[in-house]
Image (cartoon, rainbow, N blue to C red):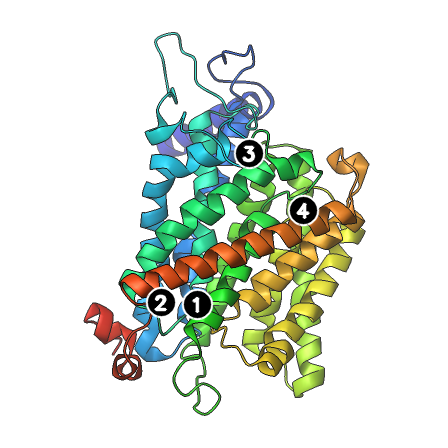
Amino acid sequence: MKAFTKTAISLYLLATALPALADGPAGPALAEGKVINAGDTSWMLISTALVLFMTIPGLALFYGGMVRKKNVLATLMQSFAVTALVTVLWIVAGYSLAFTVGTPWLGSLDRFLLDGMVYIKDTGKLTVHPLAGTIPESVFMMFQMTFAIITPALITGAFAERMKFSAMLVFMTLWSLLVYTPVAHWVWGPGGWMADKGVLDFAGGTVVHINAGIAGLVCALVMGKRLGYGREAMAPHNLVLTLVGASMLWVGWFGFNAGSAAAADGRAGLAMVTTQVATAVAALAWTFAEWFAKKKPSVLGIASGAVAGLVAITPAAGFVDIKGALLIGLVAGIVCFWGATTLKHKLGYDDSLDAFGVHGIGGIVGALLTGIFAVKSIGGVEGSLAAQALGVVVTAAYCAVVTFVLLKLVDLVIGLRVAEDEEREGLDLVLHGERVE
Protein backbone atom coordinates (compact mmCIF):
# COMPACT_ATOMS: atom_id res chain seq x y z
CA MET A 1 0.00 0.00 0.00
CA LYS A 2 2.83 2.37 0.87
CA ALA A 3 4.52 1.68 -2.50
CA PHE A 4 1.20 2.30 -4.28
CA THR A 5 0.79 5.66 -2.52
CA LYS A 6 4.31 6.76 -3.49
CA THR A 7 3.65 5.80 -7.11
CA ALA A 8 0.38 7.73 -7.21
CA ILE A 9 2.03 10.84 -5.76
CA SER A 10 4.86 10.58 -8.32
CA LEU A 11 2.41 10.29 -11.20
CA TYR A 12 0.45 13.30 -9.94
CA LEU A 13 3.60 15.43 -9.71
CA LEU A 14 4.65 14.36 -13.19
CA ALA A 15 1.22 15.19 -14.62
CA THR A 16 1.24 18.67 -13.08
CA ALA A 17 4.77 19.33 -14.38
CA LEU A 18 4.15 18.31 -18.00
CA PRO A 19 1.98 21.29 -19.02
CA ALA A 20 4.65 23.72 -17.86
CA LEU A 21 7.25 21.77 -19.80
CA ALA A 22 5.23 21.65 -23.00
CA ASP A 23 3.51 25.02 -23.02
CA GLY A 24 5.89 27.43 -21.41
CA PRO A 25 9.53 28.37 -21.75
CA ALA A 26 11.56 26.72 -19.06
CA GLY A 27 15.13 27.62 -19.77
CA PRO A 28 17.66 30.44 -19.43
CA ALA A 29 17.15 33.64 -21.36
CA LEU A 30 18.82 34.08 -24.75
CA ALA A 31 21.00 37.02 -25.63
CA GLU A 32 18.38 38.05 -28.23
CA GLY A 33 15.72 38.41 -25.57
CA LYS A 34 14.12 35.06 -26.42
CA VAL A 35 13.97 32.09 -24.12
CA ILE A 36 15.01 28.48 -24.46
CA ASN A 37 11.78 26.49 -24.77
CA ALA A 38 11.97 23.22 -22.87
CA GLY A 39 9.37 21.51 -25.04
CA ASP A 40 11.12 22.46 -28.28
CA THR A 41 14.49 21.45 -26.89
CA SER A 42 13.18 18.11 -25.66
CA TRP A 43 11.70 17.30 -29.05
CA MET A 44 14.92 18.23 -30.81
CA LEU A 45 16.99 16.08 -28.47
CA ILE A 46 14.68 13.16 -29.28
CA SER A 47 14.81 13.94 -33.02
CA THR A 48 18.59 14.01 -32.94
CA ALA A 49 18.69 10.55 -31.38
CA LEU A 50 16.14 9.29 -33.93
CA VAL A 51 18.20 10.49 -36.89
CA LEU A 52 21.37 8.94 -35.50
CA PHE A 53 19.32 5.75 -34.99
CA MET A 54 18.63 5.81 -38.75
CA THR A 55 22.32 5.26 -39.52
CA ILE A 56 23.31 3.02 -36.64
CA PRO A 57 21.71 0.55 -36.57
CA GLY A 58 19.01 1.31 -39.19
CA LEU A 59 20.95 1.85 -42.40
CA ALA A 60 23.68 -0.55 -41.30
CA LEU A 61 21.15 -3.40 -41.00
CA PHE A 62 19.23 -2.36 -44.12
CA TYR A 63 22.39 -2.51 -46.23
CA GLY A 64 23.97 -5.38 -44.30
CA GLY A 65 21.09 -7.72 -45.06
CA MET A 66 21.25 -7.05 -48.80
CA VAL A 67 24.87 -8.03 -49.41
CA ARG A 68 26.31 -11.54 -49.58
CA LYS A 69 27.24 -13.22 -46.32
CA LYS A 70 30.98 -12.80 -46.92
CA ASN A 71 30.59 -9.00 -46.94
CA VAL A 72 28.05 -8.34 -44.19
CA LEU A 73 30.52 -7.25 -41.49
CA ALA A 74 32.38 -4.96 -43.89
CA THR A 75 29.08 -3.33 -44.86
CA LEU A 76 28.03 -2.80 -41.24
CA MET A 77 31.52 -1.48 -40.50
CA GLN A 78 31.19 1.19 -43.18
CA SER A 79 28.10 2.74 -41.59
CA PHE A 80 29.64 2.59 -38.11
CA ALA A 81 32.98 4.03 -39.23
CA VAL A 82 31.33 6.84 -41.20
CA THR A 83 29.37 7.77 -38.09
CA ALA A 84 32.58 8.16 -36.09
CA LEU A 85 34.52 9.86 -38.88
CA VAL A 86 31.91 12.48 -39.77
CA THR A 87 31.30 13.29 -36.11
CA VAL A 88 34.92 14.45 -35.82
CA LEU A 89 34.87 16.28 -39.17
CA TRP A 90 31.66 18.09 -38.24
CA ILE A 91 33.04 19.26 -34.92
CA VAL A 92 36.35 20.42 -36.42
CA ALA A 93 35.11 22.35 -39.46
CA GLY A 94 32.00 20.95 -41.15
CA TYR A 95 29.42 22.67 -38.96
CA SER A 96 31.20 26.00 -39.15
CA LEU A 97 31.55 25.92 -42.94
CA ALA A 98 27.92 24.92 -43.42
CA PHE A 99 26.07 27.02 -40.85
CA THR A 100 27.95 30.25 -40.17
CA VAL A 101 27.69 33.51 -42.05
CA GLY A 102 30.29 33.73 -44.81
CA THR A 103 29.61 33.94 -48.52
CA PRO A 104 26.58 32.62 -50.45
CA TRP A 105 28.78 29.63 -51.33
CA LEU A 106 30.38 28.70 -48.03
CA GLY A 107 30.34 29.70 -44.39
CA SER A 108 33.28 30.85 -42.31
CA LEU A 109 35.48 29.20 -39.68
CA ASP A 110 33.91 31.16 -36.81
CA ARG A 111 32.86 27.88 -35.21
CA PHE A 112 36.11 25.99 -35.89
CA LEU A 113 36.27 23.28 -33.20
CA LEU A 114 32.98 24.83 -32.02
CA ASP A 115 34.86 27.92 -30.84
CA GLY A 116 32.45 30.52 -29.50
CA MET A 117 29.59 28.11 -28.90
CA VAL A 118 28.58 28.87 -25.34
CA TYR A 119 26.82 26.10 -23.47
CA ILE A 120 26.28 27.72 -20.07
CA LYS A 121 27.76 31.03 -18.93
CA ASP A 122 27.78 32.63 -15.51
CA THR A 123 24.90 34.79 -16.73
CA GLY A 124 22.82 31.71 -17.48
CA LYS A 125 22.72 32.52 -21.20
CA LEU A 126 23.23 30.10 -24.09
CA THR A 127 24.25 30.71 -27.69
CA VAL A 128 21.46 30.13 -30.18
CA HIS A 129 21.70 29.77 -33.93
CA PRO A 130 19.53 32.20 -35.96
CA LEU A 131 17.94 29.24 -37.76
CA ALA A 132 17.35 27.23 -34.60
CA GLY A 133 14.53 29.22 -32.98
CA THR A 134 14.24 28.45 -29.29
CA ILE A 135 16.73 25.61 -28.85
CA PRO A 136 20.39 25.86 -27.77
CA GLU A 137 22.94 26.02 -30.56
CA SER A 138 24.58 22.85 -29.26
CA VAL A 139 21.36 20.93 -29.93
CA PHE A 140 21.00 22.48 -33.39
CA MET A 141 24.61 21.57 -34.17
CA MET A 142 24.08 17.96 -33.05
CA PHE A 143 20.86 17.62 -35.04
CA GLN A 144 22.58 18.83 -38.21
CA MET A 145 25.51 16.50 -37.48
CA THR A 146 23.24 13.47 -37.80
CA PHE A 147 22.28 14.60 -41.31
CA ALA A 148 25.94 15.02 -42.21
CA ILE A 149 26.53 11.45 -40.95
CA ILE A 150 23.79 9.63 -42.83
CA THR A 151 24.46 11.27 -46.21
CA PRO A 152 27.88 9.71 -46.91
CA ALA A 153 26.71 6.50 -45.24
CA LEU A 154 24.01 6.24 -47.92
CA ILE A 155 26.65 6.36 -50.65
CA THR A 156 28.27 3.15 -49.40
CA GLY A 157 25.36 1.18 -50.82
CA ALA A 158 26.49 1.97 -54.35
CA PHE A 159 30.00 0.52 -54.03
CA ALA A 160 29.19 -2.26 -51.56
CA GLU A 161 31.36 -5.40 -51.71
CA ARG A 162 34.32 -3.91 -53.58
CA MET A 163 35.90 -0.74 -52.08
CA LYS A 164 38.94 -0.76 -49.79
CA PHE A 165 38.23 0.36 -46.25
CA SER A 166 41.16 2.79 -46.35
CA ALA A 167 39.92 4.28 -49.62
CA MET A 168 36.43 4.62 -48.18
CA LEU A 169 37.72 6.61 -45.20
CA VAL A 170 39.79 8.98 -47.33
CA PHE A 171 37.04 9.47 -49.91
CA MET A 172 34.37 10.12 -47.27
CA THR A 173 36.57 12.66 -45.50
CA LEU A 174 37.09 14.65 -48.69
CA TRP A 175 33.51 14.24 -49.89
CA SER A 176 31.98 15.37 -46.60
CA LEU A 177 34.03 18.59 -46.55
CA LEU A 178 34.01 19.40 -50.28
CA VAL A 179 30.54 18.27 -51.35
CA TYR A 180 28.14 17.87 -48.44
CA THR A 181 29.22 20.94 -46.50
CA PRO A 182 28.97 23.47 -49.38
CA VAL A 183 25.60 22.14 -50.58
CA ALA A 184 24.24 22.27 -47.03
CA HIS A 185 25.30 25.92 -46.84
CA TRP A 186 23.71 26.72 -50.22
CA VAL A 187 20.33 25.35 -49.18
CA TRP A 188 20.18 25.74 -45.38
CA GLY A 189 23.03 28.02 -44.28
CA PRO A 190 22.71 31.74 -43.49
CA GLY A 191 22.82 33.61 -46.81
CA GLY A 192 23.03 30.45 -48.89
CA TRP A 193 22.45 31.24 -52.56
CA MET A 194 19.97 28.43 -53.24
CA ALA A 195 17.78 29.51 -50.34
CA ASP A 196 17.83 33.04 -51.75
CA LYS A 197 16.70 31.65 -55.12
CA GLY A 198 13.68 30.04 -53.50
CA VAL A 199 14.84 26.42 -53.48
CA LEU A 200 12.75 24.52 -50.92
CA ASP A 201 14.20 21.59 -49.00
CA PHE A 202 12.47 21.00 -45.70
CA ALA A 203 14.59 18.10 -44.46
CA GLY A 204 17.18 17.06 -47.04
CA GLY A 205 15.82 15.98 -50.42
CA THR A 206 18.51 18.00 -52.16
CA VAL A 207 21.21 18.21 -49.48
CA VAL A 208 21.03 14.57 -48.43
CA HIS A 209 19.35 12.35 -51.02
CA ILE A 210 20.18 13.87 -54.40
CA ASN A 211 23.71 14.48 -53.13
CA ALA A 212 24.13 10.89 -51.92
CA GLY A 213 22.33 9.35 -54.90
CA ILE A 214 24.38 11.15 -57.54
CA ALA A 215 27.61 10.41 -55.68
CA GLY A 216 26.56 6.77 -55.50
CA LEU A 217 25.94 6.63 -59.24
CA VAL A 218 29.35 8.13 -59.98
CA CYS A 219 30.98 5.65 -57.58
CA ALA A 220 29.27 2.73 -59.33
CA LEU A 221 30.38 3.96 -62.75
CA VAL A 222 33.97 4.73 -61.76
CA MET A 223 34.54 1.52 -59.81
CA GLY A 224 32.84 -0.78 -62.27
CA LYS A 225 30.76 -3.87 -61.63
CA ARG A 226 31.31 -6.48 -58.97
CA LEU A 227 33.02 -9.64 -60.17
CA GLY A 228 30.40 -11.94 -61.63
CA TYR A 229 27.70 -9.26 -61.76
CA GLY A 230 24.98 -10.39 -64.13
CA ARG A 231 26.38 -13.94 -64.29
CA GLU A 232 26.44 -15.12 -60.68
CA ALA A 233 23.73 -15.11 -58.04
CA MET A 234 24.09 -12.10 -55.71
CA ALA A 235 20.92 -12.49 -53.69
CA PRO A 236 20.68 -10.78 -50.28
CA HIS A 237 21.97 -13.05 -47.55
CA ASN A 238 19.43 -12.05 -44.88
CA LEU A 239 16.25 -10.14 -45.72
CA VAL A 240 15.23 -10.24 -42.05
CA LEU A 241 18.04 -7.78 -41.31
CA THR A 242 16.99 -5.64 -44.26
CA LEU A 243 13.35 -5.46 -43.19
CA VAL A 244 14.33 -4.69 -39.59
CA GLY A 245 16.68 -1.97 -40.87
CA ALA A 246 13.96 -0.50 -43.11
CA SER A 247 11.58 -0.46 -40.13
CA MET A 248 14.17 1.43 -38.08
CA LEU A 249 14.61 3.91 -40.92
CA TRP A 250 10.85 4.47 -41.06
CA VAL A 251 10.64 5.17 -37.32
CA GLY A 252 13.82 7.27 -37.25
CA TRP A 253 12.62 9.34 -40.20
CA PHE A 254 10.09 11.09 -37.98
CA GLY A 255 13.06 12.73 -36.29
CA PHE A 256 14.52 13.48 -39.71
CA ASN A 257 11.40 15.20 -41.08
CA ALA A 258 9.32 16.31 -38.11
CA GLY A 259 12.50 17.36 -36.30
CA SER A 260 13.32 19.73 -39.15
CA ALA A 261 10.56 22.01 -37.89
CA ALA A 262 13.04 22.79 -35.06
CA ALA A 263 10.11 23.05 -32.67
CA ALA A 264 7.42 20.92 -31.03
CA ASP A 265 4.62 22.61 -32.93
CA GLY A 266 1.88 22.10 -35.51
CA ARG A 267 4.29 22.08 -38.42
CA ALA A 268 6.23 19.24 -36.84
CA GLY A 269 2.95 17.39 -36.43
CA LEU A 270 2.06 17.95 -40.08
CA ALA A 271 5.51 16.80 -41.21
CA MET A 272 5.03 13.61 -39.19
CA VAL A 273 1.66 12.93 -40.84
CA THR A 274 2.84 13.62 -44.40
CA THR A 275 5.87 11.40 -43.79
CA GLN A 276 3.72 8.48 -42.65
CA VAL A 277 1.24 8.89 -45.52
CA ALA A 278 3.80 9.17 -48.33
CA THR A 279 5.80 6.24 -47.00
CA ALA A 280 2.79 3.94 -46.77
CA VAL A 281 1.58 4.86 -50.26
CA ALA A 282 5.03 4.42 -51.81
CA ALA A 283 5.47 1.01 -50.15
CA LEU A 284 2.17 -0.12 -51.63
CA ALA A 285 2.88 1.45 -55.03
CA TRP A 286 6.25 -0.34 -55.33
CA THR A 287 4.66 -3.60 -54.14
CA PHE A 288 1.84 -3.52 -56.69
CA ALA A 289 4.17 -2.43 -59.49
CA GLU A 290 6.48 -5.34 -58.70
CA TRP A 291 3.52 -7.71 -58.35
CA PHE A 292 2.33 -6.71 -61.80
CA ALA A 293 5.77 -6.86 -63.43
CA LYS A 294 7.23 -9.93 -61.71
CA LYS A 295 4.07 -11.79 -60.60
CA LYS A 296 5.12 -11.80 -56.92
CA PRO A 297 5.43 -9.03 -54.33
CA SER A 298 8.71 -9.29 -52.41
CA VAL A 299 9.85 -8.34 -48.93
CA LEU A 300 12.79 -6.44 -50.44
CA GLY A 301 10.35 -4.61 -52.69
CA ILE A 302 8.01 -3.34 -49.99
CA ALA A 303 10.98 -2.29 -47.84
CA SER A 304 12.59 -0.45 -50.77
CA GLY A 305 9.26 1.19 -51.62
CA ALA A 306 8.90 2.48 -48.07
CA VAL A 307 12.39 3.99 -48.19
CA ALA A 308 11.59 5.57 -51.57
CA GLY A 309 8.55 7.25 -50.03
CA LEU A 310 10.57 8.47 -47.07
CA VAL A 311 13.14 9.95 -49.43
CA ALA A 312 10.63 11.67 -51.69
CA ILE A 313 8.58 13.30 -48.93
CA THR A 314 11.69 14.62 -47.17
CA PRO A 315 11.99 17.95 -49.07
CA ALA A 316 8.23 18.46 -48.96
CA ALA A 317 7.21 17.26 -45.49
CA GLY A 318 6.63 20.70 -43.98
CA PHE A 319 5.36 22.38 -47.15
CA VAL A 320 2.58 20.12 -48.49
CA ASP A 321 -0.84 18.93 -47.38
CA ILE A 322 -2.11 15.36 -47.16
CA LYS A 323 -3.20 15.24 -50.81
CA GLY A 324 0.27 16.30 -51.87
CA ALA A 325 1.83 13.61 -49.65
CA LEU A 326 -0.40 10.94 -51.21
CA LEU A 327 0.62 11.91 -54.74
CA ILE A 328 4.31 12.22 -53.89
CA GLY A 329 4.30 8.76 -52.35
CA LEU A 330 2.47 7.25 -55.32
CA VAL A 331 4.84 8.73 -57.90
CA ALA A 332 7.94 7.89 -55.86
CA GLY A 333 6.98 4.25 -55.39
CA ILE A 334 6.41 3.65 -59.09
CA VAL A 335 9.29 5.74 -60.46
CA CYS A 336 11.86 4.38 -57.99
CA PHE A 337 10.78 0.81 -58.76
CA TRP A 338 11.46 1.54 -62.41
CA GLY A 339 14.80 3.20 -61.59
CA ALA A 340 16.03 0.41 -59.33
CA THR A 341 15.06 -2.35 -61.76
CA THR A 342 14.44 -1.46 -65.40
CA LEU A 343 16.71 1.60 -65.69
CA LYS A 344 19.64 0.00 -63.86
CA HIS A 345 19.55 -3.14 -65.97
CA LYS A 346 19.12 -1.28 -69.25
CA LEU A 347 22.07 1.02 -68.57
CA GLY A 348 24.15 -1.79 -67.08
CA TYR A 349 25.69 -0.05 -64.06
CA ASP A 350 26.16 -1.91 -60.77
CA ASP A 351 24.58 0.26 -58.08
CA SER A 352 24.86 -2.59 -55.57
CA LEU A 353 22.14 -1.59 -53.10
CA ASP A 354 20.28 1.00 -55.21
CA ALA A 355 21.68 4.15 -53.63
CA PHE A 356 20.92 6.04 -56.84
CA GLY A 357 17.76 4.13 -57.73
CA VAL A 358 16.10 4.96 -54.41
CA HIS A 359 17.85 8.03 -52.99
CA GLY A 360 18.93 9.78 -56.18
CA ILE A 361 15.73 9.25 -58.15
CA GLY A 362 13.51 9.56 -55.07
CA GLY A 363 15.23 12.78 -54.08
CA ILE A 364 14.77 14.26 -57.55
CA VAL A 365 11.10 13.25 -57.65
CA GLY A 366 10.47 14.73 -54.21
CA ALA A 367 12.34 17.95 -54.90
CA LEU A 368 10.47 18.64 -58.14
CA LEU A 369 7.06 17.73 -56.73
CA THR A 370 7.69 20.03 -53.77
CA GLY A 371 7.66 22.88 -56.27
CA ILE A 372 4.27 21.74 -57.53
CA PHE A 373 2.47 20.78 -54.31
CA ALA A 374 3.88 23.27 -51.76
CA VAL A 375 1.01 25.15 -50.07
CA LYS A 376 1.78 28.73 -49.04
CA SER A 377 -0.63 28.69 -46.11
CA ILE A 378 1.32 25.75 -44.64
CA GLY A 379 4.97 26.63 -45.26
CA GLY A 380 4.63 30.36 -45.80
CA VAL A 381 6.28 30.20 -49.22
CA GLU A 382 5.17 29.64 -52.80
CA GLY A 383 6.42 26.53 -54.53
CA SER A 384 8.33 27.06 -57.78
CA LEU A 385 9.06 24.19 -60.15
CA ALA A 386 11.74 26.32 -61.85
CA ALA A 387 13.54 26.97 -58.55
CA GLN A 388 13.35 23.31 -57.60
CA ALA A 389 14.69 22.25 -61.00
CA LEU A 390 17.58 24.70 -60.56
CA GLY A 391 18.42 23.14 -57.21
CA VAL A 392 18.29 19.62 -58.64
CA VAL A 393 20.46 20.38 -61.69
CA VAL A 394 23.12 22.40 -59.88
CA THR A 395 23.39 19.96 -56.98
CA ALA A 396 23.60 16.96 -59.30
CA ALA A 397 26.19 18.59 -61.55
CA TYR A 398 28.39 19.86 -58.72
CA CYS A 399 28.21 16.58 -56.84
CA ALA A 400 28.94 14.50 -59.95
CA VAL A 401 32.00 16.50 -60.99
CA VAL A 402 33.60 16.77 -57.54
CA THR A 403 32.84 13.13 -56.68
CA PHE A 404 34.46 11.98 -59.93
CA VAL A 405 37.59 14.04 -59.26
CA LEU A 406 37.86 12.80 -55.66
CA LEU A 407 37.47 9.15 -56.69
CA LYS A 408 40.17 9.48 -59.33
CA LEU A 409 42.48 11.21 -56.85
CA VAL A 410 42.01 8.52 -54.21
CA ASP A 411 42.46 5.80 -56.81
CA LEU A 412 45.70 7.40 -57.96
CA VAL A 413 47.13 7.69 -54.46
CA ILE A 414 46.04 4.51 -52.64
CA GLY A 415 43.70 2.65 -55.02
CA LEU A 416 39.93 2.32 -54.68
CA ARG A 417 39.20 -1.33 -55.15
CA VAL A 418 40.34 -4.54 -53.49
CA ALA A 419 42.18 -7.10 -55.64
CA GLU A 420 40.11 -9.67 -57.55
CA ASP A 421 41.10 -12.60 -55.34
CA GLU A 422 40.26 -10.51 -52.24
CA GLU A 423 36.86 -9.61 -53.65
CA ARG A 424 36.12 -13.28 -54.30
CA GLU A 425 37.13 -14.24 -50.77
CA GLY A 426 35.00 -11.50 -49.25
CA LEU A 427 35.72 -8.19 -47.54
CA ASP A 428 34.91 -9.41 -44.04
CA LEU A 429 37.94 -11.67 -43.84
CA VAL A 430 40.26 -9.73 -46.15
CA LEU A 431 39.75 -6.25 -44.69
CA HIS A 432 38.77 -6.96 -41.09
CA GLY A 433 39.95 -10.48 -40.30
CA GLU A 434 36.51 -11.56 -39.19
CA ARG A 435 33.59 -13.48 -40.61
CA VAL A 436 29.99 -14.41 -39.84
CA GLU A 437 29.71 -18.12 -39.09
Of helix, strand and loop, which one carries label 4?
loop
Q: Which residue is mark 4?
A: 317
Q: CA distance from mark 4 to mark 2?
A: 30 Å
Q: Relative to residue 240, is residue 390 depicted above or below?
A: above
Of helix, strand and loop, which one carries label 1?
helix
Q: Position of residue 105 (x, y in %)?
A: 54, 37
Residue at 33% across / 74% down in the picture? 71
Q: CA distance from mark 4 to mark 1?
A: 25 Å
The numbered mark, 4 or 2, whose residue comes first in the sequence reads 2
Q: Relative to residue 229, is residue 260 depicted above or below?
A: above
Q: Position of residue 249 (x, y in %)?
A: 51, 57
Residue at 41% across / 72% down in the picture? 223
Which quarter of the rendering shows the N terminus? top left
Give the label on residue 189, or none: 3
Residue 15 in sight in this render: no
The numbered mark, 4 or 3, whose residue comes first in the sequence reads 3
Residue 258 in sight in this render: yes
From the viewer's perspective, tell me whether residue 284 is left or right of residue 107: right
Mark 4 or 3: in front is 3
What amino acid does circle 4 point to?
Ala
Q: Residues within 10 Å of mark 1 (few under 14, many from 20)?
A: many
Quadrant housing residue 9 = top left
359, 17: nearer the viewer:
359
Q: Which residue is mark 2?
A: 75
Give the label on residue 3, or none: none
420, 330: nearer the viewer:
420
319, 403: nearer the viewer:
403
Q: CA distance from mark 3 to mark 2?
A: 32 Å
The numbered mark, 3 or 2, whose residue comes first in the sequence reads 2
Q: CA distance from mark 2 to mark 1?
A: 7 Å
What amino acid does circle 2 point to?
Thr
